[in-house]
Amino acid sequence: MIIIGLAAIVAILAGFIFGISSAEWFFVLIIIGLIAATEMINTAIEALVDLVTTKTHPLAKIAKDTASSATLILSMTAFVGALVVFVPKIIELLK
């Protein structure tokens, strides 16, 4: 969760530095919230599975892997979204 928090701070600071639009702010803040919520759900699922069984079970593995994969997919989507929002601003700055 620390990495997610740091990434959120970097995204927010970059938003202020580059003066992103209201629509871009909406996108950035929604993605930050979704990633944080997805990570919390992932943590809850992992804790619940650990509570139910301490043994390695194929269904427990599927539950944990699927929950963490959801976080990974959303994080990759956020990265692409950040490229869409911030790369044009960086290119403009370098001109």
Image: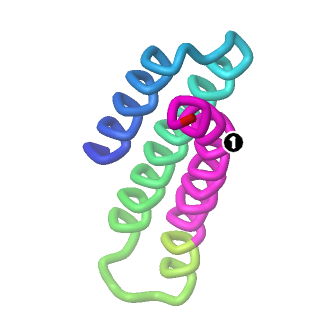
Percent x, y of residue 55: 34, 86
| Residue drawn at 60 percent across, 17 percent down | 20
Q: Can you name the residue that lies furthest to the left here?
A: 2
Percent x, y of residue 76: 59, 58
Mark 1: secondary structure: helix
Q: Badge 1, how many Cα within 10 Å: few under 14, some, many 20+? A: few
Q: Is residue 2 magenta?
A: no
| Residue drawn at 36 percent across, 33 percent down | 10
Give the total of numbered labels: 1
Give the residue at mark 1. 84
Q: Name the image quarter holding the C terminus.
A: top right
- Seen in the picture, residue 79 relative to 65 is either above or below; the reply is above
Q: For this rendering, which residue is in front, 52 or 92?
A: 92
Q: For this rendering, which residue is in front, 90 or 72?
A: 90
Q: Can you name the residue that lies furthest to the front here?
A: 95
Magenta residues, start to end? 66-94
The figure's colour scheme reads: rainbow
Percent x, y of residue 31: 60, 34
Q: Name the image quarter holding the N terminus.
A: top left
Q: Can you name the residue that lies furthest to the right here?
A: 23
- Seen in the picture, residue 89 relative to 66 is either above or below; the reply is above
Q: For this rendering, which residue is in front, 38 or 24?
A: 24
Judged left or right of residue 80, residue 51 is left
- Seen in the picture, residue 35 relative to 74 is either above or below; the reply is above
Chief secondary structure of the magenta portion:
helix
| Residue drawn at 73 percent across, 17 percent down | 23
| Residue drawn at 37 percent across, 43 percent down | 4
Percent x, y of residue 49: 43, 66
The amino acid type found where label 1 is placed reads Val
Q: Is residue 69 magenta?
A: yes
